[in-house]
Amino acid sequence: MADHPSKFKPTLGLIDATMIVAGSMIGSGIFIVSADMLKDVGSAGWLIFAWLLTGFLTLTAAINYGELSAMYPKAGGQYVYLKEAYNPLIGFLYGWSFFAVIQTGTIAAVGVAFSRYTAYLIPGLSEKNIIADFGFIKINAAQICSIVVIIFLTYINTRGIKSGKWIQNIFTGTKLLSLFGLIIAGLFVFNAGIWHANWTNAWQMMQHSSRTGASINPPAWQTLTGFAIIGALTSALVGSIFSSDAWNNVTFIAGEIKNPKKNIGLSLFMGTLTVTIIYVLCNLMYLSVLSNSEIAFAP
């Protein structure tokens, strides 16, 4: 019997791939980073501009990745692109760095975040709940929760692409519906006075004194001009770009996507565009119900 090389079975359609892009991007960042961003830019106009600029950068990168995926529709994503662009050594080094540090660290961080947020609903899973103390190391309930979740999701994915697809689609669908629900809820509590106040000096960039290192008591806002504006905007982009990262994850499973030359590029565009619109709408909703200072110093 002749030996046949093993191949991935294309199983995921365009919607599945788009859900992977959106699900990889959406995390806790959209609820957190706007506060720090407002401390950097100090106005509604510049806050929304930062999110729009991030969306433009993300969409541009996604379109470029779509072209790469059409040229090299293989599983491996960046590993394949680096290998073809430079040489196998560069691809090899990136592949092992991704396996040993980059993705491993990301999975661990997501696991920790999951357990910390779960502890708000189930206090027994808090980091304060010490299960074992060996002197040199303490094991708490949050760590156990994180490990169990990672093992469970790993097991689901080992069952095959179809099992992983349903988990991904369900969780991404839940996140999208939750964010849309939050945006719609914001419309019902829209405050015209707050909205008008936030947009009165929308393009006057200010930075909170704690950002400039100034020892002002009480803390105050300082108007920025010249090159300081570029520095403040760049600092603010750190948060929005962090919240929009991981869109390229879909390229790692190119071999399991139907018609990858077409669908990967489309999924990257549709997924990043959808998330960009949601993120901008979320921030507009924040500005319609909370003052700039309330957003910047949200507990």
Image: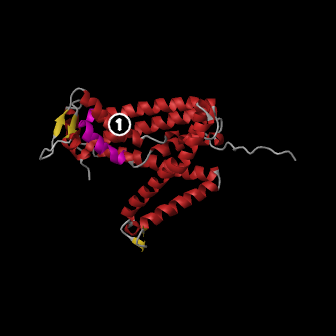
- Identity of the residue furthest to the top in this view: 226
- Residue 186's image quarter? top left
Seen from the viewer's position, the closer of residues 274 and 190 is: 274
- Determine crowd level at label 1: few under 14, some 14-19, many 20+ residues with C-alpha closer than 10 A: many
In x, y percent, where is residue 178? 42, 49
In x, y percent, where is residue 162? 63, 51
**Residue at image coords 60%, 38%:** 89
Tell me the SS state at disc 1.
helix
Residue at numbered disc 1 = 237
Seen from the viewer's position, the closer of residues 280 and 143 is: 143
In x, y percent, where is residue 237? 35, 36
Direction from residue 151 to residue 256 in the image, left or right: right
- Going by the numbered disc 1, the residue's amino acid type is Leu
| Residue range highlighted in magenta | 30-45
Within the magenta stretch, is there residue 80?
Answer: no
In x, y percent, where is residue 191? 23, 42
**Residue at image coords 62%, 29%:** 71
Vertical side of 133 occupied by 201: above or below: above
**Residue at image coords 13%, 44%:** 216
- Identity of the residue furthest to the right in this view: 1
**Residue at image coords 64%, 34%:** 73
